[in-house]
Image (tube, rainbow, N blue to C red):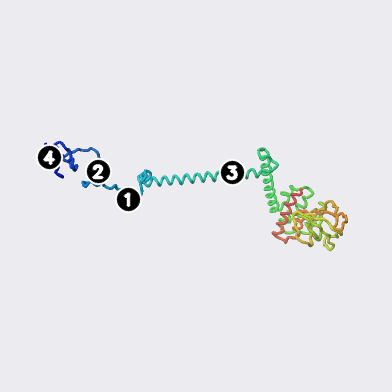
Amino acid sequence: MSHQCPRCGTSAAGAAAFCIACGQQLTTPPVAVSLAIDPPIRQPLPPATGQAAEPVVPPAVQGVAASDDDLIAQALPPRFWRKRRFQGAALAGLVVVIGIGAWIAAQKSHRAVESIPADVPVNDASGVAAQRRAEAEERHRQSVERDELKDAIRARQPSRFCHRVASEASHACNVLVFIAHDGRSKPYWRDTLQQYLKKKGYKKIAGYIIARHDDGLYEAAYLQDTDFGPMPSGRFILLTHATEYSSKGRFALWAIERDKRQITTTDGFSQSWKVFEETPFGNAVEMVFRAPAGNETTAAATETLKALTLNR
């Protein structure tokens, strides 16, 4: 049994399901019941004109050949990429922190090596520990000494501090504590300090700086018109530690006489000159005499007491 195609009129066999000329369906297929939640999407048949349908390109990639990576990137949700960017930033920050920590550790190690004295081996842990203990003990001693000095001046009780000095200096120490507490010096106290300086061999010299030969090394001449006794004539060598003279001129300070030194003059003559060395304690006492009454005298006497402990 044959019948004609309702679309193009071509004869077809009775069992044919489609027209051999145009592909028109000739029989009605049985209705299939699908149990799937979402039915499958059927693609439309090609047009009857015989022209191929143009492929549909997504708007985001029109004019560009889409690769597999691009398609994957478009398929992933935005929160995925936000998470990936956050992880990348966190990893970069961790690398930076590790690098900074390594640099700081290297610097600390370098400084630790530099802080060890040259005469102590780097691997001598016991020597370094002993040095640190000695430094700690010295700091503690100085702290206790400062506290005792403040307490003695405040209470006007020299015994709280003057036990630190030699017995021959105890009287001078007592006088300095009184001066620091009262903020002024009396004639009797001045005489006591000057007698102590003379017992120690200190001399108050007045002179004129002629030339500077090196740091703390000067050529000087005696001055005759002074208020503290006659001066010999001639020249001498002056050694200073705390005082610097940048030009020629008069000076006066407390010093101690050292051995003589043979000098050859510019004329070729050989002479023997005395050598005087500046004494910080004597100059500190002189500052007490010159300071105005009040806080300045107290400060000068306090510094002199500190210098006195160095001469014990």
Residues packed near mark 4 inside 10 Å, few (<14), some (14 to 19) or many (20 plus): some
Amino acid on which disc 4 is placed: His
Sequence-first disc among 3 and 2 = 2
Of residues 217 and 100, the one nearer the viewer is: 100
Sequence-first disc among 1 and 4 = 4
Secondary element at tag 3: helix
Sequence-first disc among 3 and 4 = 4
Amino acid on which disc 2 is placed: Gln
- The answer to whether marks 3 and 2 mark residues whose Cβ atoms lie closer than 8 Å is no
Of residues 301 and 106, the one nearer the viewer is: 106
Res 136 → quadrant: top right
| Disc number lying in front (3 or 4) | 4
- Could one spot residue 192 in this view of the protein? no
Amino acid on which disc 1 is placed: Pro
Secondary element at tag 4: strand
Of residues 111 and 294, the one nearer the viewer is: 111
**How many angstroms separate mark 1 from mark 3 (CA)?**
57 Å
Residues packed near mark 1 inside 10 Å, few (<14), some (14 to 19) or many (20 plus): few
Secondary element at tag 1: helix
| Residue 181 in the figure: left or right of residue 230 | left
| Disc number lying in front (2 or 4) | 4
- The answer to whether marks 1 and 3 mark residues whose Cβ atoms lie closer than 8 Å is no
Q: Which percent across, then down, holds residue 312?
A: 76, 48
Secondary element at tag 2: loop
**How many angstroms separate mark 3 from mark 2 (CA)?**
70 Å
| Residue 55 in the figure: left or right of residue 200 | left
Residue to which mark 3 is pinned: 106
Sequence-first disc among 1 and 3 = 1
Sequence-first disc among 2 and 1 = 2
Q: Which mark is residue 59?
A: 1
Residue to which mark 2 is pinned: 43
Sequence-first disc among 2 and 4 = 4
